[in-house]
Image (cartoon, rainbow, N blue to C red):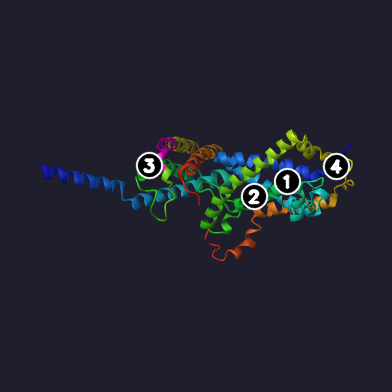
Amino acid sequence: MKLKLIVALALGAATTAAVAGEVEDQIRFRQSAYSFLGWNTAKIKAQAADHPETFNKDQVIAAANAVAAVANSGLLSLYGQGTDKGTGWKPTRLKPEFFEKQDEVKEIEATFIKEANELQKVAANGDAAEVKAQFGKVGATCKSCHDLIRVRE
Amino acid sequence: MKVEVHIWDWPLRLFHWLLVIAVVGAYATGKLGGNLTDWHARFGSLILGLLVFRLIWGFIGTTHARFASFFPTFSRLVEYVKGEWQGVGHNPAGAIAIIALLAVLSFLAVTGLFANDDIAFEGPLFHSIDKELSDKLSGWHIYAVNILLGLVAVHVSAIVLYQRLKKTNLVGAMLTGKKQLPRSLAPSPVKPVGPFRFVITLLIAVTVVWGVWSGGFVNYLAPLASFQTATAHPKT
């Protein structure tokens, strides 16, 4: 009986670990998420802000959907203990202070989700100027997190 | 007996106050981010143009605008420390602060051209270097802001101290170009600004900023970054 419990607990622990991933996995997944995010924000920036003459409603909607999907994907689950050190695709730039600033971090995540969802809505209307304005708000939440917990090169 | 003497020429004063506006604007928009980052780039470009102007004006401007007239040489510093320095433009201690301010601002203006914020900003020369170097320069850009803040604090507190302790109105002098000086110190009058020199200096400054943004300089920089290939950053 006791042995069964231990085995069950051990299995449970192993499963949890597999979901959250090893340190390197978490770092790699989140770096990938931000790369993918960057691909999509770059499209929005190019089409809504820098070259509005190239604005393509469908592409911007697709990109805004992707941004919102990344924002809502539960990114913070990729920031387990110990993930301030380690190498995913490249060494992580997470500051150790991340773990002491959980309140601020969660607030930033909530704002990021809110603004990204709004961007998704705005994109559906197909107005470049509106998209640009809302895109700026999303960008500001990116910056607030970079300023707080990302190591400067 | 004091007399009013014209010290600072009008391009220098215009430079100074435009620089104040541009630095405050760049700092605020840099802190706020978002779509104001576009304005950060504009203020940065203005700072770059102003610095180019000041650099040239430091050689061909009127007497007290010239670096040679106020450069803090060793002998001038010794005189100043002994309390024997006599002059009417920037004193040697002030000159150190001014040169440091111009140097840090130049560093900020130049690194900003190559910077990126990993969000939605890429400086106009970002594509002429590789991303890793741009990331480094972007980090230094932000560290240098702290040095700038320190220097600005020194600059402003020195002006307040001069006002309080020596009753010298340096802000007024930078606005009107005139200083109240003892007759014994009053120098020969500063020559008027040469319109030709002013236009040439302005043209060079504008050309540099325009060249940076139009991509005209990227072609010249490309061979320097030999590790870079033209296809590394296709513009799609």
Residues at marks 4 and 2 on the same chain: yes
- Mark 2–mark 3 distance (CA, rounded to whole Å): 38 Å
- Mark 1–mark 2 distance (CA, rounded to whole Å): 15 Å
- B6 vs A67, left or right, is right
Residue type for callout 1: Gly
Q: Name the residue tied to disc 1.
A: B94
Q: Is residue B4 magenta?
A: no
- The answer to which of B153 and B134 lies nearer the viewer is B153
Q: Where on the picture, by quarter, is residue B179?
A: top right
The magenta-colored residue range is A98-109
Residues at marks 4 and 3 on the same chain: no
Residue type for callout 4: His
Give the x, y percent position of residue B96.
70, 49
For discs 1 and 2, the disc positioned in front in the rendered view: 1
- A134 vs B77, left or right, is left
- Mark 1–mark 4 distance (CA, rounded to whole Å): 19 Å
